[in-house]
Structure formats: structure tokens, C-alpha cells
Amino acid sequence: MFKWRQFGRILLFILIFGIVSYLFLPLFSVFVSKSPSLLFEKLNSDITYSALLLSLQTTGISLVIIILFGTPLAYWLAKSDFVGKEWLEVALKMPIVAPTAVVGVGLLLVFGQRGMLGNMLSFLGIEIPFTWIAVVFAQVFMATPFFVTTARQAFEAVDNQLLAVSRTLGVTPWHTFWRVTIPLALPGLLSGVALSWALALGEFGATMMFAGNLPGKTQTLPLAIYTAMESDADVAVAISALLLTVSFLLLLLVSFIDKIMHKTISR
């Protein structure tokens, strides 16, 4: 019996070690395959600067749009019951499971020159595909479900009795939302913002299909990696290290926010 238990523990350790190594080594190799000095040197390139600037600009705009429209949607889903709610929740999660290339094709079919809204947009003199606006559209589409899901969970964690007490004291629903709901849900909202930004920053497939890979115009950091692999692999590795570092810092931020949220709730 003892030998079988010992064998089971060893087998479990091997399985855990194998999957952790498989998930960790490809990311770790980005940092150890080249010297830090070489990575910094390769980051000092025009393709990196232009892609980084465009990524920061587009993700910043995308976050504003996601927060502006996603927050009321998340609150509505958290605090309301209505017919068809389950179907809406499933529809909102579709971008998470949909292949990004399919999303890019779908955006073209709607906003392209021959798309569903193409004639109207052309009449108004608006061009979306293969512009920086298309980059924003792709990022918003892919990142919004993550923010809405996280924000909804944060709003659901706010005790409805606290909101009822606030209203019985004569505070309007609008002021209750800003003075009670938002402060209590803020850690979860910030987690949603961080996760959405990380996802928007790394978005590739939908951007490639809908916005193209035009240097200085629609080429974000992930697309710059794709381009650099064809000419200078060291630049691709350097940009990959930059993206991984940013993503890691964002995950640390989310973890820190979660700890604060749990401490606040426990009090």
C-alpha cells in the first residue's frame, strides 16, 4: 500500500512538473535566449517605437470606450433580472471563444466598404478598415467581454442592503451608484481594466484581418513581432520580452487589487 501511495505521489509530481514546465519554459526562454543588453539594444529601433506608440494610443482609447459602455452594461447584468438575460450573457461571451481571425472577417463584413454598413459609412465619408480606428474596433471587440465579466462580478459582490439603506436615507439612485456602489466595486473594476488592457495590448488576429499590418499606421506591437520575425528575429524577441514584462506587471497589479478587495470584504 505504501509503495503504491509513493508511486502515486511521484507520478502526480511528474505530471504537475511536466505541465508547469510546458507552460513556463516558452515564456521564460524569451528572456534567457538573448542577453539583456542585446534585448535593450534591439528595442531601440524605429519599428518598436512606432508600434509601441500606436499600441499605447489605441489601447488607451479602447479602454475609455470599454469603461464608458461596459460599466453600465455590467451593472445592469448584475442588478437586474429580465427575459433573455441568459441568452445575452452567452452572446457577450462569444468574443472570448470566437477565433480572432473570424472576428476580423466579421468586422470587415460589417464595416468594410462592401459590408452591411459600408454604403452608409462611405456616404458619411468615414473609412474604418485598415486605419487606426480599425485597430481600436478590434481591441474593443476582443477586450470588452473580459471587462464586463469582471465588472459584473464586482457589482454582484456589493450588498443590495447597503444600496437600499442609502436610498431610504434620501440619497438618489445616481448618487448611491457613485458614492456607494462604485467605491465598493472599485477593486474589481480596476482588475477588469488591467485584464482588458493586457488583452487589447496583445490582440493580433482580428487586428491583422481588419486593420492590416501597416507600419506606422496600424502596426501594433504584436504585429511588429510578426514583421520582425521575417527580417530580424532578435527584434521580435526583444518586443516579445517587452510585451511579456508589461503583461506580468499587469497580472501583479490584478493580484494586488484582489488582495485589497478580499481584505476590504473581510472587514
Image: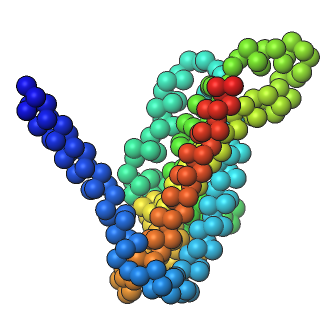
Of residue 163 and residue 106, the one placed in the foreground of this image is: 163
For residue 104, above or below residue 51: above
Could one spot residue 122 in this view of the protein? no
For residue 47, above or below residue 186: below
Q: Where is residue 44, by image quadrant? A: bottom right
In this picture, residue 243 sits left or right of residue 58: left
Residue lying at the far front of the rendered structure: 2
Q: Position of residue 113 (x, y in %)?
A: 53, 63
Of residue 255 and residue 4, the one placed in the foreground of this image is: 4
**Figure coloring:** rainbow
Which residue is at a point 63% across and 67% down the rendered structure image? 56
Q: Position of residue 49 (x, y in %)?
A: 59, 80
In this picture, residue 224 sits left or right of residue 189: left
Which residue is at a point 22% across and 51% down the rendered structure image? 18
Q: Where is residue 21, by image quadrant? A: bottom left
In the rendered picture of this protein, how many numbered marks are placed on residues? 0
Which residue is at a point 51% across and 71% down the rendered structure image? 242
For residue 81, above or below residue 214: above
Which residue is at a point 7% across and 32% down the rendered structure image? 3
Q: Where is residue 190, by image quadrant? A: top right
Tell me the quadrant of the picture where the N terminus can be found: top left
Of residue 261 and residue 3, the one placed in the foreground of this image is: 3
Of residue 196 and residue 258, the one placed in the foreground of this image is: 258
Q: Position of residue 22 (x, y in %)?
A: 27, 56
Tell me the quadrant of the picture where the C terminus can be found: top right
For residue 165, above or below residue 15: above
Could one spot residue 27 in this view of the protein? yes
